[in-house]
Amino acid sequence: MGTEGFYRTRTHRAHQLFGTDERQMQELQFEFFVPLEHAKAAMAATREVSKNWHLPCSTDPEGKPFANYTDIRVIRADEHWLSPTTSYHGGDTIAMAMGLNKNARGEVLTSTLKALEDALSPFQMRPHWGKMSTYTHADYRRLYGSKLEEFCRVASELDPTGKMRNDWVKEKLFGTVEPRRDWWLEDFVDTGAAAQ
């Protein structure tokens, strides 16, 4: 399937693509959603921003490329409170997820992420609130409005002590902790080593 080289196309049913051997890696991931009618322009903008992502990542000790893959899929609109595909624009959505080198760090990563967000902002882009983004609590409040408020209200009623909230959720969705820094500057924890 596809052609050899950096850009390789694989088209198939999701269950036959996701979970394949090449996806079994530690990675950093961006994911963005735009209305389907902006798909062509958003993909062109993404390709322009990512044109050098096949080059070695300057923060990777082995010199591996900055990007591992891009997944593109179309998702039906829905009305779920925190779904990035909520029909705020009245139609279906295209999702673009980028798997990046786990060793990408610091300004290299932050500036790349910001450049992609800026390039996609004219197309009503929403970042996945659970993945890497420079968006703040105020940005998510602007994007989700009363649906975010309702989610936080119900979550607080059902989980008054916040046991089911980590610092990311507290910062990005609830706005109850101060933004501390770029989350992706943290090193991955080797869970196998930590368990011993």
Image (spheres, rainbow, N blue to C red):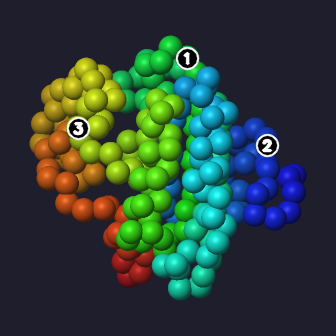
Looking at the picture, how far across and down is residue 163, in whole percent? 20, 46
Left or right, 193 with respect to 42, comes to left
> CA–CA distance between discs 1 and 3?
25 Å
Q: Is residue 195 above or below residue 49?
A: below
- Amino acid type of disc 3? Ala
Looking at the picture, how far across and down is residue 103, in whole percent? 49, 74
Point out the tag, 1 or 3, that comes first from the N-terminus: 1
Point out the tag, 2 or 1, that comes first from the N-terminus: 2
CB-based contact (under 8 Å), mark 2 and mark 1: no
Q: Tell me the element at label 3.
A: helix
Q: Tell me the element at label 2.
A: loop
* Residue 191 showing in the rendered view: no
Left or right, 130 with respect to 141, comes to right
**Front-lying residue, 196 or 172:** 172
> CA–CA distance between discs 2 and 3?
37 Å
For residue 88, which quarter of the picture? top left
Q: Which residue is mark 2?
A: 11
- Amino acid type of disc 2? Thr
What residue is drawn where x is 12% and y is 36%? 160
What residue is drawn where x is 49% and y is 50%? 116
Q: Residue furthest bottom?
A: 61
Q: Tell me the element at label 1.
A: loop
Q: Which residue is mark 1?
A: 91
